[in-house]
Image (tube, helix red, strand yellow):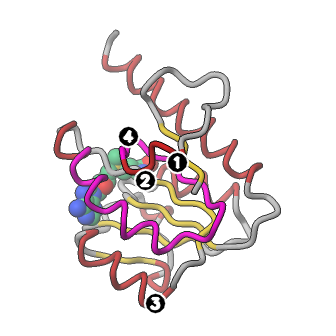
Amino acid sequence: MSRLESAIRRLRAQKIALDWAAKNIYDQPGFVLEFGLGNGRTFDHMRELFPKREIYVFERKIAAHPDCIPDPAFQFIGDFLVSIPRAIEQLGRGAALAHVDIGTGEKNTSLALASKIAPSIEKLLCAGAIIVSDQQVDRWDSHKIPLPGGISKNRIHLYRL
Ligand SMILES: C[S@@+](CC[C@H](N)C(=O)[O-])C[C@H]1O[C@@H](n2cnc3c(N)ncnc32)[C@H](O)[C@@H]1O
């Protein structure tokens, strides 16, 4: 498979999973979390899906498209290991959805990072929250939920805590 085809599959999987999550937290109050703002592509889609919810983003350094940068009040800047504890203090356990999109191309590094931040992410989630993750997280294995149709294998992982 070419890198172009692989990228298309990944982006399609993200969109299907986020659209599915939006429908499935419809009745559940809570804010939304984006781990890995990147160029702001998925944040921009989440803004459309959740016009009435607060969306907090986590990113080492803002480098997104200028139209896709949230208000500073909704940014947690710096390494996740530092910014997530700050968010726990500030926001508490109130998120209905977390989108974990932290992959940087080094598969083992990304997997290890996801596994390291997973216990802290949990502290931001309310009961029944959905996690859409680009990395598999063993700790959440028993919370795995089946993927909606149209997603290629191993592109995205869905968990409900
Ligand atoms: C795949 S990109 C995110 C793509 C983005 N969701 C989009 O749609 O444009 C992953 C992002 O995670 C960020 N990231 C990776 N490790 C990080 C860490 N330890 N702390 C903070 N940000 C990190 C990277 O800077 C990068 O922007």
The residue type indicated by label 2 comes to Val
- The reply to whether callout 2 and callout 4 are in contact (CB within 8 Å) is no
Q: Distance between the Cα atoms at labels 3 and 2?
A: 19 Å
Q: Residues within 10 Å of mark 2 (few under 14, many from 20)?
A: many
Residue 84 image point, x, y percent: 35, 75
Residue 53 image point, x, y percent: 69, 72
Q: Earlier in the sequence, mark 2 or mark 4?
A: 2
Q: Quadrant of the C terminus?
A: bottom right
Q: Distance between the Cα atoms at labels 1 and 4?
A: 10 Å
Q: Distance between the Cα atoms at labels 2 and 1?
A: 6 Å
Q: Quadrant of the N terminus?
A: top left
Which mark identifies residue 114?
Answer: none
Tell us which disc is closer to us: 2 or 4.
4
Residue on which disc 4 sits: 136
Residue closest to the eye, 144 or 40: 144
The residue type indicated by label 3 comes to Gln
Q: For residue 59, which quarter of the picture? A: bottom left
Residue on which disc 2 sits: 100
Task: Identify the residue at image location x=35%, y=55%.
Answer: 38
